[in-house]
Image (tube, rainbow, N blue to C red):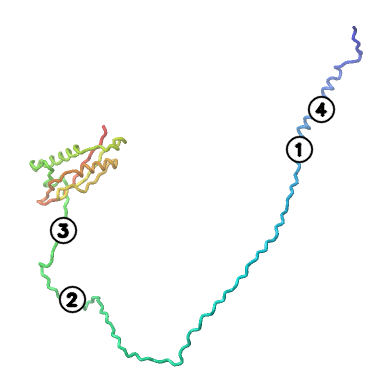
Amino acid sequence: MQVKKHPNADLNRNSGLYFVIGLTLVLFVTWRALEYKSYEQPHEELIHMVDVPMLDENVPKTEQIRTAPPPPPPAAPEVIEVVEDTEEIEETLIESTEMTQETVVADVDLEASDIEVVEEEEEISVPFAVIEEVPVFPGCEGVSREEQRTCFQQKIQEHIARNFQYPETATELGIQGKVYVLFYIGTDGQVAGIETRGPDKMLEAEARRIIASLPQMKPGRQRNKNVRVPYSIPINFKLL
């Protein structure tokens, strides 16, 4: 079968023009779509006015209280009678107790035996290094005077080692260090005036307890008189 075709019919003849026209229309529609803007329509709000009637306050009427005026003072009598004062009043004389230069002091006979003189003994402190007779620790009575110092120091060390107890809390916390203790042996041989200085309060308390437990000693003497003897010693707290 032979296809019949018009010799002047060419479908591709105006295809470029149609493409340009179609592209132009598409771009125009797209541009208008992008430029389109819409606005919200304003809503009318109805405001209802509420009429509030005026409130009339009725103020109650108060009644004024009228008090009666005070009575007038009594009038003076027309005739004034004068009464004579016939009674005698005894006046009490108060003598002054202040002393002046003219006051005479009564002579008092005083004898020397009537005056009691109280002598207050002054407690003298003599350092341990220069005292003539050092305090005698119990157990050092039989040694010579030259060996008293060595025996005293040795007995102090033995007492500290025998009564030493490391505080349990200080052991757990790892606290250690050296505590310096200062005390004195009084004229009665008792230990008093204990002062401590160390790295921790627990170690200071233990050092104070050890020194306070020292026994009574024979007091030190200077020029045949009992004197107070200060003494200091370090106590070393060290964890092994």
Question: Which amino acid, mark 3?
Answer: Glu
Dot 4 corresponds to which residue?
Answer: 25
Frontmost residue, 106 versus 47: 47
Local SS, label 4: helix
Question: Which amino acid, mark 4?
Answer: Leu
C-alpha distance separating marks 3 and 2: 32 Å
Dot 3 corresponds to which residue?
Answer: 120
Frontmost residue, 103 versus 40: 40
C-alpha distance separating marks 2 and 1: 126 Å
Whether residues under marks 4 and 3 lie with C-beta atoms below 8 angstroms apart, the answer is no
Residue 107 image offset from top left, x and y in percent: 14, 75
Question: Which amino acid, mark 2?
Answer: Val
Image quarter in which the C terminus is found: top left
**Residue that sits furthest to the top in the current view:** 1
In percent of the image, x 75 and y 46: which residue is there?
A: 44
Image quarter in which the N terminus is found: top right
Question: Which amino acid, mark 1?
Answer: Ser
Dot 2 corresponds to which residue?
Answer: 105
- The mark found on residue 38 in the picture is 1
